[in-house]
Image (tube, rainbow, N blue to C red):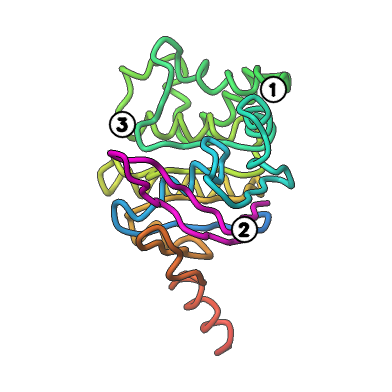
Amino acid sequence: MLRTKELTKTVNSQGQDLTILSDVSLTVNERDTVAIVGVSGSGKSTLLSLLAGLDVPSKGEVFLAEQPLHQLDEDERAAVRAQNVGFVFQSFHLLPGLSALENVMLPIELKEQGEAKKRATELLEKVGLKERLHHYPNQLSGGEQQRVAIARAFASEPKILFADEPTGNLDTQNGDKVSDLLFELNQQLGTTLVLVTHDDRLAERCQRVIRLEGGQVVEDGNSASTQSNSAAVGQK
C-alpha cells in the first residue's frame, strides 16, 4: 500500500538548510496498522504529509497504491488521494456550515458513489451519533466532532486512512472511544491505518510502531501488544 525509498525533506530556514527527514525507507502492506511515534520535532507529521501526498520530498521516492507521488503534480496527487485516502486530524476539520450528516455525505457525493444519505446515516449510527445527524459542529462536543470526522474519513471506503494525533484534543474517556472506533472500522472495512500519536496506549494497539528521532527511523518493529499476543499464542 505504501513504499518509500530514502525519503528526505529539507527546508530553508533563515538562509540555512534544515533537514526534517533523512533517508526514510519503509513499506506498509495492505490492512496493516502502523503508529509513527517520537518527540515533538522528530518529523512525524512531516512523514505523514509525504506519505499522503500532501507535501513533496526534497529527494527520495514515495509510492501510494503503486502511484509515484514524488513524480506527480498537486492535481495528480489530489486525484490519488481522492481515490485511495481518508484523513482524521487532531482539530477535526469539519465544515461548520454543514450538519453532521452533510459532513459525512460530502466525500461520498464527491466520489459519486451513490446513496450518500443512507451510507452517511449508517456510519453515524455506527459511531453512536444516531441522535446527532442534524446537529452542526458547534452543537457537538469535541468527542462527538471527532466521531463525525471518523465517520467522514471512512465514508468513501478509503484503502488507507491517515490519522494525525486523532485523540490529541480529547480527554481520556473520549480518546478511548475514538480509538475503539478507529480500530473497529479499520477491521470491518479492511482499511490500512497509519497514525501519528504521542499516546503510547494508542500506539500499542497498532501491529507495528515506527519511532523517529531527529528525522530518522531509530526503531521499526512489532508493538508491545503484538509481541505479547504472539508470545501468548506460542505458549498455548
The majority secondary structure of the magenta stretch comes to strand
Locate residue 208, reporting x and y percent: 52, 65
Give neighbour class at mark 3: few <14, some 14-19, many 20+ (Cα, 10 Å).
some
Give the label on residue 5, or none: 2
* Cα–Cα gap, marks 2 and 1: 31 Å
Task: Decide which of tag 3 and tag 2 comes sooner along the chain.
Answer: 2
71, 193: nearer the viewer: 71
Instruction: Tell me, yes or no, whether the two marked residues, 2 and 1, touch with CB atoms within 8 Å.
Output: no
Locate residue 27, reporting x and y percent: 63, 60
Locate residue 48, reporting x and y percent: 48, 46
Helix, strand or loop at mark 3: helix
Where is mark 1, residue-wise? 111
Number of on-image labels: 3
Q: Amino acid at mark 3?
A: Gly
3, 30: nearer the viewer: 3
- In the rendered structure, does residue 66 fall within the stretch colored magenta? no
Helix, strand or loop at mark 2: strand
Locate residue 126, reporting x and y percent: 53, 36
From the viewer's perspective, is 201 left or right of 233? left
* Cα–Cα gap, marks 1 and 3: 27 Å
Q: Residue at x 51, y 71 (%)?
A: 222
Q: Amino acid at mark 1?
A: Lys
Q: Which residues are magenta?
A: 1-28
Where is mark 3, residue-wise? 142
Q: Residue at x 52, y 60 (%)?
A: 23
Q: Amino acid at mark 2?
A: Lys
